[in-house]
Image: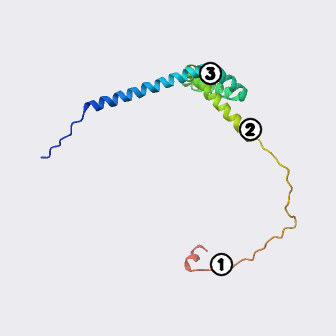
Amino acid sequence: MNQFHFKSYNKGNSWLGIIIIVAIIVFIFFIIQNLYKLFALLAPVFLILTAILDYRVIAKFGIVIYELLRYRTVLGILAVIFSIIGLPFVSAAMFFNAFMNFKTKRRNKKRYIDYEDVSDKDDDILILEDKEKIKLDDYENLFD
């Protein structure tokens, strides 16, 4: 009968891994908390700049919230609660959206230049003669 022997492992390494994972989670939590505080201070500025750059972004966000409240009430209520709690991140996202809309509008402005049409009206039309089909074998007869 075969017996399996498992190597024992150092339990200290597993505790070290758990401590490192907890430390990383705490570090990420502090980063997000500080970003939230920073964006909370900048939220009014973001909203004002959004209204200046492209006011339709704010209107579209309001329409989306209204439609959610109208057709999917529970999801709409959750969206309103998360929008209030996450107002700093929502305002930053709306500012980014308005800024990108502003940049693409500026880039897409068509700039026309003066040009002169140089095409000839007396173009010679090249007329090709019909070539007869060369039959290679009986296989092509199947498709005729």
Label 2: which residue?
A: 106
Q: CA distance from mark 3 to mark 1?
A: 75 Å
- The C terminus lies in which quarter of the figure? bottom right
Label 3: which residue?
A: 42
Which mark's residue is nearer the viewer, 3 or 1?
3
- Residue 97 image offset from top left, x and y in percent: 65, 32
- Residue 9 image offset from top left, x and y in percent: 24, 35
Within-10-Å neighbours for mark 2: few <14, some 14–19, many 20+: few
Label 1: which residue?
A: 133
The reply to whether callout 3 and callout 2 are in contact (CB within 8 Å) is no
Which amino acid does the dot numbered 1 rest on?
Answer: Lys
At x 60%, y 19%, the residue is 41
Q: Which secondary structure lies at badge 1?
A: loop
The quarter holding residue 19 reads top left
Which mark's residue is nearer the viewer, 2 or 1?
2
At x 24%, y 33%, the residue is 10
